[in-house]
């Protein structure tokens, strides 16, 4: 007897990624920090977009976040 292939993850087991929170205007000190909160946000947003694209590939018929 052959084992059955794994079932696709249920939506509750594989929720869509959550976008990062955008920094508030007062969170940037405007002093030219080497790593600004806006830089960190841009990196987090890139990661979110990649995770969302991967999630959409796993859930082509699922609800769009």
Image (spheres, rainbow, N blue to C red):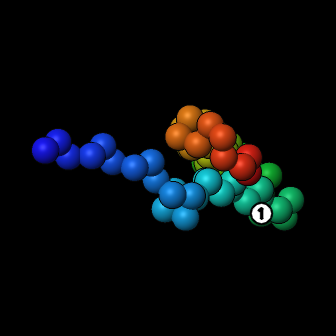
Give SS at disc 1.
helix
Residue 5 point in image, percent of width and height: 30, 43
Which residue extends farthest right?
25
In front here: 7 or 22?
A: 7
Which residue extends farthest left?
1
**Horizontal arrangement in the rendering, residue 65 relative to residue 55 (left or right):** right
Residue at 58% in and 42% down: 59
Residue 40 visible at all: no
Q: Is residue 60 above or below residue 36?
A: above
In front here: 50 or 22?
A: 50
Residue at 61% in and 53% down: 17
Q: Determine which quarter of the picture holds residue 60.
A: top right
Residue 15 point in image, percent of width and height: 58, 58
Q: Callout 1 environment at 10 Å: few (<14), some (14 to 19), or many (20+)?
A: few
Residue that badge 1 annotates: 27
In front here: 48 or 43?
A: 48
Residue at 46% in and 53% down: 9
Q: Where's the N terminus, which quadrant?
A: top left
Q: Determine which quarter of the picture holds residue 42.
A: top right
**Horizontal arrangement in the rendering, residue 49 relative to residue 6 (left or right):** right
In front here: 29 or 45?
A: 45
Q: Is residue 21 above or below residue 47?
A: below
Residue at 69% in and 54% down: 19
Q: Is residue 14 above or below residue 43?
A: below
Residue 57 point in image, percent of width and height: 56, 35
Residue 16 visible at all: yes
**Horizontal arrangement in the rendering, residue 24 relative to residue 58 (left or right):** right
The number of numbered badges drawn on the structure is 1
């Amino acid at each position: 007897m052959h084992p059955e292939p794994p079932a696709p993850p249920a939506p509750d087991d594989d929720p869509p990624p959550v976008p990062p929170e955008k920094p508030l205007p007062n969170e940037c000190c405007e002093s030219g920090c080497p790593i600004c909160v806006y830089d960190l946000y841009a990196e987090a947003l890139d990661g979110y977009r990649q995770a969302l694209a991967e999630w959409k590939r796993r859930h082509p018929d699922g609800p769009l976040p």
